[in-house]
Image (cartoon, helix red, strand yellow):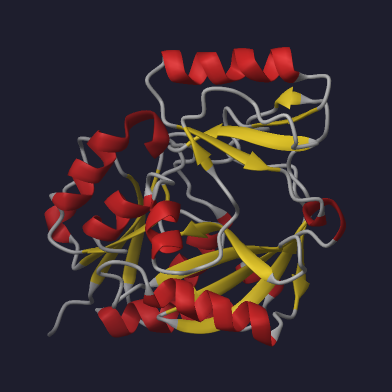
Amino acid sequence: MTASPRCALATCSWLPEGSDDARMLAAGLAGLGVDADIAVWDDPAVDWSRYDLVVVRSPWDYTDRREAFVAWAEGLPRVLNAADVLRWNSDKRYLRDLEAAGLPVVPTRWDPEDIPADWPEFVLKPSVSSGSRDTARWGRGEEDAARAHLRDLRDAGRTVMLQPYLGAVDTAGETALVFLGGEYSHAGRKARVLNPGAGIEGLTGLGETRGKVTATTATDAELDLAHRVLAAVPGGGDLLYARVDLVPGADGAPVLIELELIEPALYLELAPGSEARFAKVVADRL
């Protein structure tokens, strides 16, 4: 009798039972005859060699120990998304690669010396971060606090990103396009996360941000840009999942604000049937 394939869905110690997406995926896989365990990525008691595939889902603490996380992924028999993709995507300096490939991204100044005088609002954040940790939205009159934030990040040896705050985030919000197995699945509209004048907001609870997400329909322009972004991912030919976050730029055309290939929420609950599609994609890889 042939044994059922085994799959591990990697999470973190903050959330040992896994994210909502992970639990939905585990249930979908069980319906396809796949044994799926939710396991903490840095738990020394887990024998990863017993799994045919490890799917990275909710290791939301990886930014605290990025090198250890990537080394763990590199040591697995088989992991998706692939370890080289995880390494590349775990530092937001990947935006420089995508911009160099001719893709429209949010304008970014790297390790700036000071705050530009002609930006009415701006965002400061480290290049290795998730869930808006150590990220803040600043405006005119808050330059001293922003400079202190900039100094703190630089003194900690972190790469600093300075971006103009795009007002469309407050009105149109971000559009998050979800891809499963390289195919577009569905989209969510994310309300703003950073509030004006609130300083460094970080996380609320276990990795959950303030941005409410509702179902939406991606435009042709958004779909076109998302496909171009994914085509430019180094070694990204077999992406199991991806989330492409876009926002209207100054001229209204979409620009990339973030590409999530490690542990994004995939908003499966917004799209009936997406849980089954995701489970099928994973089962096909097995």
**Residue farthest to the front?**
118
Which residue is located at x 52 percent, y 14 percent? 152
Circle count: 0
Q: Position of residue 184 (x, y in %)?
A: 54, 83
- Whether residue 11 is visible to the viewer of this picture, yes or no, is yes
Asked if one can make out residue 42 in the rendered structure from this viewpoint, the answer is no
> Residue 261: where, in percent of width, then height?
42, 60
Position of residue 222 measured from the top left corner of the image (x, y, whole percent): 64, 77
Residue situated in front as seen by the camera: 117 or 256: 117
Quadrant for the N terminus, please: bottom left
- In this rendering, the answer to whether 224 lies above or below 7 is below
- Residue depicted at x 60% and y 72%: 177
Query: Compared to 248, does 49 lie above or below?
Result: above
Q: Quadrant of the C terminus?
A: bottom left
Q: Is residue 282 left or right of residue 104?
A: left
Q: Nearer the viewer, residue 230 or 241?
A: 230
Q: Residue at x 32, y 36 (%)?
A: 66
Percent coordinates x, y for residue 242 in the rendering: 46, 68
Residue 49, located in which quarter of the rendered image?
A: bottom left
Which residue is at a point 37% across and 47% down the rendered structure image?
A: 90
